[in-house]
């Protein structure tokens, strides 16, 4: 009876985790297990000095991820090198980066900081980055109670192939068609100059576990 009870407890705990997803350790901000059909594979925090600015989570399309990243099936987060993260950034399987503000800042400051990180990672000019910035500014103005990136505001960047869909607090703000922009934004979190090494490490663990 005790063994059955223990097994039931383990099963219920696993089910609860699957439904609830995970909490980003540094901020305690929760992320659901699923977002628009994609699966959560890791969370992390973006800091500026000692200040926790936002928590970040990565959701991926399970089947596409398994196909694109299958060669790393027998790897570990400790053993993977830049090639793993390059494949993660450049592969076309669906990825959704979700940011949840841990503190409130002006929408201009948030968009400026994101643009500053993305810009040097883009290989071409054009209007993709200005359009991305405009969608974010408009989205914060229309879909947040204060018109700012206040604490608790959620930003989602859904990258499907060469198209990025932007949402603020679950409300669609529009799309930008630019493979360069998609790769540059992903690179902010997963290249050698990642703005969130905790997200990078957590996602390596999550993706390898999925394989």
Image (cartoon, helix red, strand yellow):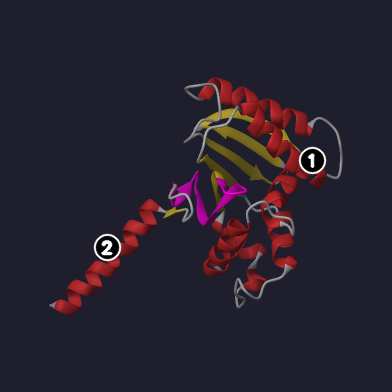
Residue toward you, 116 or 38: 116
Residue toward you, 140 or 110: 110
Q: Helix, strand, or loop for circle 2?
A: helix
Q: Residue at x 76, y 44 (%)?
A: 179
Q: Residue at x 70, y 30 (%)?
A: 133
Whether tag 2 and tag 1 are in contact, CB under 8 A, the answer is no
Q: As drawn, which residue projects farthest toward the front?
A: 50
Query: On the rendered image, what quadrant is the C terminus found in?
Result: bottom right
Q: Position of residue 25 (x, y in %)?
A: 46, 56
| Residues shaded magenta | 30-51
Badge 1: residue crowd in 10 Å (few <14, some 14–19, many ≥20): some
Whether the magenta-drawn stretch holds residue 16 is answered as: no
| Res 64 visible | no
Can you identify the residue that label 1 sits on? Answer: 119
- Label of residue 168 in the image: none
Front label number (2 vs 1): 1
Q: Position of residue 171 (x, y in %)?
A: 52, 29
| Res 153 visible | yes
**Which of the marked residues, 2 or 1, is nearer the chain's N terminus?**
2
């Amino acid at each position: 009876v005790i063994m059955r009870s223990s097994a039931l407890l383990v099963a219920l705990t696993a089910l609860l985790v699957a439904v609830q997803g995970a909490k980003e350790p540094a901020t305690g901000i929760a992320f659901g297990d699923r977002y628009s059909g994609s699966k959560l594979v890791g969370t992390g925090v973006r800091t500026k000095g000692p200040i926790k600015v936002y928590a970040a989570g990565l959701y991926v399309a399970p089947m596409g991820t398994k196909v694109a990243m299958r060669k790393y099936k027998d790897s570990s987060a400790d053993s993977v090198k830049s090639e793993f993260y390059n494949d993660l950034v450049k592969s076309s399987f669906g990825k959704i980066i979700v940011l949840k503000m841990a503190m409130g800042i002006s929408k201009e400051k948030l968009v400026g900081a994101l643009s500053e990180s993305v810009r040097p990672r883009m290989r071409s000019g054009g209007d993709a980055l200005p359009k991305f910035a405009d969608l974010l500014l408009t989205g914060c103005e229309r879909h947040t109670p204060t018109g700012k990136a206040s604490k608790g505001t959620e930003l989602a960047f859904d990258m499907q192939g060469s198209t990025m869909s932007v949402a603020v607090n679950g409300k669609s703000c529009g799309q930008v068609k630019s493979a360069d922009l998609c790769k540059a934004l992903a690179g902010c979190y997963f290249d050698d100059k990642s703005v969130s090494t905790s997200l990078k490490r957590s996602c390596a663990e999550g993706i390898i576990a999925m394989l």
